[in-house]
Amino acid sequence: MTAATNQTTVVQPLRPWRPTFSQQFARFVTVVLVVAAAAVVVLVSPLAGLAGIALVAIPLQMAVSVARSSRHGSVAARNDVATSLIWSAFLVLLVPWMSIIFTVVRRGYQAISVNFFTDDMRITAPDADLASGGIAHAIVGTLIMVAIASIVSVPLGILSGIYITEIRGRFTKVVRFIVQAMSGVPSIVAGLFIYSTLVLYNKSYSGLAGALALAVLMVPTVARTSEEVLKLVPEDLRFAGYALGSSQASNVFRIVLPTVRSGLVTSGILGVARVAGETAPLLMTAQVFLATKGNPLDGPLGSLPVVIFSFFQNGADNAVTRAWGASMVLMILITFLFALARAVSADRRRSRR
Amino acid sequence: MRLSKKSVAALFAAVTIAGTGGTVVSANQQTLTGAGSTFIKNLFDACIPEYNDISNDTVSYGGGGSGAGRTAFINGTADYAASEARFGSAEKPPADFTYVPLIAGPVAIAYKNSNLTGTLQLSPATIAKIFAGQITTWNHADIAAENAGITLPSNNIVVVYRADSSGTSTVFAQYLTAAAASIWTKAPSGTFVNAMPSGAPAGSIAAPGSDGVINKVASTEGSITYVELSFQKENLGDGVKAASVRNAAGTYVAPSPVAAAAAVAALPAANYDQATGWVSPDFLTTVPNAYPITALAMGIARKTYSAKNDSVRDFFNYILNTCAKAQAPSLGYAALTGNSLRFAQARANTISVVGNPALTTVKRNQTITGANLVAAAGLAGTPTLRVTKGGNVCRVVNKTDIRGTRAGTCDVRVTVGTTNVTLKITVTR
């Protein structure tokens, strides 16, 4: 061998699985052809609509992928089949999701106006003109009840997560079992529990009772999620902390918890998402109220899910439009809370680094 | 998205402040909580905002069904309730409750069959056979015999009924028991499946709530159900029609507020229960233009005086005297008139009077009527009065009234029949 050249060449990693442009183009054309063929089949057969097209197109795409295997070899064929399967599954999942958002917006946008957010239904009938009345009472009520429920259940949930993963005391199994059992409790049972204790004792529905019913539902979600999140903390990190001479408490609060801050925020968010749309327990505990008020201790309190329910029950066109509008507000509110919690947790982490 | 703690707090504050742009309830206004009948809910939905507007009170109505309303009233979580069924023997209502009839309305036999043109006519016996599962096709001989001019399709009848405990179910089952006793052999029940003679017919569908059953009918060809008229009217566009029902006079009458009002107007005196205020419907009405399946929704309230109960009385009076008359026809109800209205007004005025200080306070040289004293004592009838203490403060005049003679207090014993109640009367200058 002669040292003929001193040139250094940067070795590009070979990526044989990566399709070339022409392959990608061919694949795209195939998909378009398959969908077009499916559309033709739907036109001439009793199948109808998007579902019909999907029903024909997905198996057809599989068949085409398998047929192409003779030219591209079995690995490429399997890759093609898997790719088209995953993409079809994604699109199929996207359909109901988009459909929900689209339906809620299409049917509810007429209800949205300034007064919808600033006024309540105290002196407005559900079937009255959309220019009057609103759901301020329900927005405030839901925010109050979700806030109280979070204050009660987030610390409780995270602490039980810490008990299970960090302290690992004698009752670890019992706590985990109870948390798992609680997560299966139907929401109406949580409502009944608070109804038969707090509501009957006070002889009055109240926002606080509603919040506590939500808290009962929220605790297991928060506890289970935070347990899963805490399990992700590498043991090495804990050992390192102990090696530096920290106590268990400071290890937990200064090393473990900050490591998974965003995960814990997520657990709180999941808890809120779990309860924000609950109707049955609130009907029994907070019942309905038509005026805006900020006191969760004094009598019934309105909330978005219950307002949606009673608008739908009324059945008049304007009432149903209000119900869709309120559903839209509920969706936006939860999205907003998600974004808020995300932003807050991201913000703190950035400033620390 | 970058947000500090402060901006988060500010956002929440902004949302809260925006929320208070609506009406804020202050302490001296009453907030009334109600629950019960879904039959009357659409009327309450229309009347409550009007009453809130003129009174400064905040009344809410949670619905939930007649049974739930009675329970909430017993438990004290509801200040008033509405129901089409009486308190059951196992229920223990507070001793001072009263029923107040608030509204009447027809229960329609709603059906959907696009191949059936014209209006179906049904006798009580045929309706009972359909809901008992003895008639299973639309062209059954019994239906054909009553609908000579109509071509009947041969598809199956799908019976749709209420899954939840409901006053409407109770009324409909009571009607079938009264008008078709030989076929409908089971006792009425709020849970309709328990009242069906041989259980739910094959292929029948149970759905919760009035809106639930009517939506099922609207989407199921060949189905039939019983539902408040307003719900049938809302679904007319989907081809849901209402059958005309034969009354005891032999006339087929279509459900309408007018036909229901005719049934209520002809109620015999025996159907008015003077003791509790309950008014029973007359399913065997012989008035030719009366619709036989007419339900009466009762308000339930307390006779004991309190500021809240005062508001309940004002609210019920507002419904009886003002709101029902204006709203009932468009919502498919029949407002009470004549005898029934007078009876209802008298009942409403027994709310919040027992122990009401306004009824036992009198100015010097003026009189309290015996009727007020009887009401304040929580009794009914013509009283015998006797001053038992403070004979120089007040005295009995005209045998039934009390006149204050000088400032002070006195005790008056009110006797109706064998019941004695002693009231403390205050005489002011």
Image (tube, grey):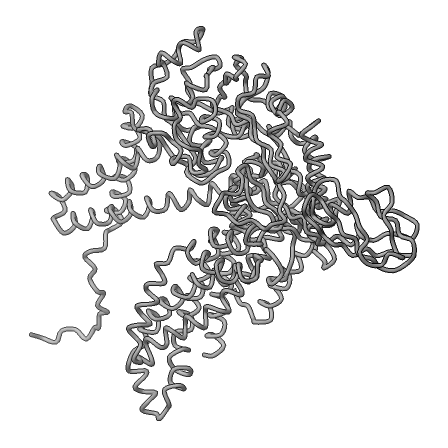
Q: Residue at x 14, y 52 (%)?
A: A75
B421 and A284: which one is in front? B421
A6 and A262: which one is in front? A262
The quadrant of the rendering that contains the N terminus of chain A is bottom left
B3 sits to left or right of A6? right
Say if A56 sits above or below A85 in the image: above
Residue A67 position in % (x across, y down): 15, 40
Residue A68 position in % (x across, y down): 16, 42
Residue B45 shows in the view: no
- Which residue of the protein is positioned furthest toward the top in this rendering? B149
Q: Residue at x 39, y 22 (%)?
A: B182
**Residue A321 occupies quadrant:** top right
B285 and B411: which one is in front? B411
The quadrant of the rendering that contains the C terminus of chain A is bottom left
Residue A60 shows in the view: yes
Say if A197 sits above or below B266 in the image: below
Instruction: Please tell me how many numbered marks the rendered image carries.
Output: 0
**Residue B233 occupies quadrant:** top right
Q: Residue at x 49, y 35 (%)?
A: B210
B296 and B207: which one is in front? B296
B3 sits to left or right of B317? left
Residue B97 position in % (x across, y down): 62, 46
Say if A12 sits above or below A121 in the image: below
- Which residue of the protein is positioned furthest toward the bottom in this rendering? A245
